Image (cartoon, rainbow, N blue to C red):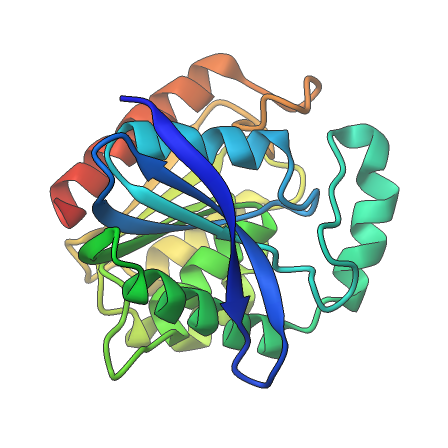
Amino acid sequence: MTSATRYEKVTAIDGGSFDAFCAVPEGGSGPGILLFQEIFGINDNIRDLSSRLAGEGYVVLAPDMFWRIEPRFERKDESGIGEAFAIVQKFDFEQGIADIQAAHAHLLGMSACTGKIGAVGFCLGGGLAFAAAALSRVDGRGIDAAVPYYGSPVNGLLEHADKVECPVLFHYGDADAFIPMNLIEEVEAAFADRDDVEVLHYPAGHAFSNSDAPSMYNADAAAQAWERTVAFFDRTLK
């Protein structure tokens, strides 16, 4: 399946508006997926992942989570990591959660979205996908599935683990220099009693799914995690 892409304008809860990259499947409708960026912003990698998910039959919305700092901030790879870290230092997580909720409401309100909503994110976005599962509610309704990839902020949000009502699939690299094994084990312990939460491990480092970052990218781990992600969303959203 091919997809059509465009930018949507999302109304923020506290006023103003921000952009979100949108990819719609060839059929014109489907379940929704919120896709959350890495620290490099909505770049070619995120746009490509959005189109790939749309090709699987999903309506994808990737909100610009840095809009309050620098709208449409975008860097391609490790060469922009200094600027990306500088942006992250200014990122207000509480405002970010409000923007997640605004994007969630926008996606639910799109005529192309048939109802169920998932969330997936990478690095910073992995934490945002987890935050969506734990904290975003629209008219009392949460999202229906979440897939955090090596979510650096997840451990700081585990106090909200009991608020996660949907199935979750975590992806981690066992050689992640930013998320040591003890933090991965902390996530596993927090959900040890949940049959619908799975923590998967890969012989890879951080950002192993980012094809724009050659020093981090691990093609085998990325392909396996992607196949599992699509299967998970097909099972929980369709």
- Picture residue at 35% right of the left edge, 60% below the top: 107
Where is 31 relative to 221, above or below? below
Q: Nearer the viewer, residue 74 or 150?
A: 74
Q: Does residue 180 sit above or below 15 in this rendering?
A: above
Give the position of the C terminus as an image quadrant: top left
Name which residue lies at 22% across and 49% down.
Answer: 31
In percent of width and height, residue 14 lies at 58, 86
Which sits in the foreground, 186 or 195?
A: 195
Q: Is residue 183 visible?
A: no
Q: Is residue 34 left or right of residue 234?
A: right
Whether residue 102 sits left or right of residue 210 in the image: it is: left
Residue 160 vs residue 106, the one in the foreground = 106
**Residue 129 figure quarter:** bottom left
Residue 80 drawn at (x, y percent)? 83, 36
Instruction: Left or right? Give the position of 185 relative to 197.
Output: right
The picture places residue 146, in percent across and down from the top left corner, at 32, 53
Determine whether 140 is above or below 26 in the image: below
What's the residue at 15%, 48% (across, down)? Answer: 236
Q: Residue at x 21, y 39 (%)?
A: 232
In the figure, is residue 32 to the left or right of 214?
left
Q: How many marks?
A: 0
The answer, for residue 118, to whether it is visible in the render is yes
Placement of 159 over or under 88, stated as above or below: below
The N terminus lies in quadrant? top left
Task: Please state the horizontal and vertical placement of residue 72, each as a whole percent of the image.
Answer: 71, 51
